[in-house]
Amino acid sequence: MELLGIDIGGSGIKGAIVNAATGELVTERLRLPSPPTFQPDEVVAVVADLVKQFNYSGPIGVGFPGVVMHGTVVAPPTALAFPNWVGVNLAERVSAAVGCPVTVGNDADVAAMAEMFFGAGRGETGVVMMFTLGTGIGSALFINGHIVPNTEMGRVYPRDSKKTIEQLASDRVREEQKLSWKEWGEKLNDYFKYIELLFYPDVIIIGGGVSKKHEKFFPHIKVRARLIPAAFRNEAGIVGAAMAALDQIAPQPWELPGAGHSEG
Ligand code: BGC
């Protein structure tokens, strides 16, 4: 089934129509810039604009860069620090704006579902974690293909630090601080070693646009887990959002517990 998947990010809001049963994009990806002040009304308006550009009517899946429970944003995007998102029922707001059923989940969770079922994690069992390295750091945790939603591992504070790992080692920070691959890789190494101490994942999948340059920083990350780059790169969020929407129509092998749905 072909559904519209939308990935809301700090710098761009991207979408494509996806065959959510195979993970394939059936249209070009469209991208509109995110409103710099990232207010809920503004973001909803850009999403509605994107839906219009696809001339689309039908179920829509949306990934959002914050904690989302039952369609409502309960913790704002930390990397963007816009607190007035708390309590916004994004599923309802978008479906009211576009007149379509809308399903909303955390961006890293939906991206990880795409990787797990159609990408780098395909066929993996046991404990699999995925991290998206971008404006922020997103995380996802699977046990035998079942996701534990909203894990938010980018909010971890390294020892003696007043900043979260996301504020110290996201890809945005790498760019802003002009960190070398080695410097950045070593920061990530400390972080993933700590994650390993907490969860002992069998596999760690690294996503986000920078994962295409994985050979530059993977050598500095010395974890016991198998470290693999994402297969979808920047499209995982779009594909996974459409997958979450499909699961609301008919139960799929994947499921995002607590994904919020509004019929519009
Ligand atoms: C948010 C997460 C999100 C991640 C990646 C963080 O700032 O807290 O919910 O998954 O950014 O966008």
Image (tube, rainbow, N blue to C red):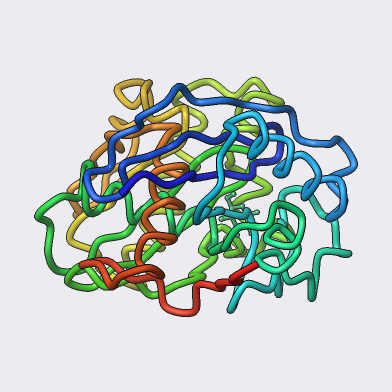
Q: Position of residue 242 (x, y in %)?
A: 42, 51
In the picture, measured across the screen, residue 99 lies left or right of residue 70, that is right
Q: Where is residue 84, by image quadrant?
A: bottom right
Q: Where is residue 53, by image quadrant?
A: top right
Nearer to the camera, 77 or 180: 77
- Against 173, residue 116 (above or below) is below
Q: Which quarter of the image is occupied by the C terminus?
A: bottom right
Q: Position of residue 194 (x, y in %)?
A: 41, 62
Nearer to the camera, 125 or 13: 13
Q: Where is residue 15, by image quadrant?
A: top right
In the picture, measured across the screen, residue 215 lies left or right of residue 173, that is left
Q: Position of residue 91 (x, y in %)?
A: 65, 66
Nearer to the camera, 235 or 27: 27
Seen at 70% across and 40% down, the residue is 10
Seen at 35% across and 30% down, the residue is 26
Q: Position of residue 121 (x, y in %)?
A: 20, 50
Seen at 42% across and 78% down, the residue is 257
- Against 172, residue 8 (above or below) is below
Seen at 22% across and 44% down, the residue is 22
In the picture, measured across the screen, residue 259 lies left or right of residue 47, that is left
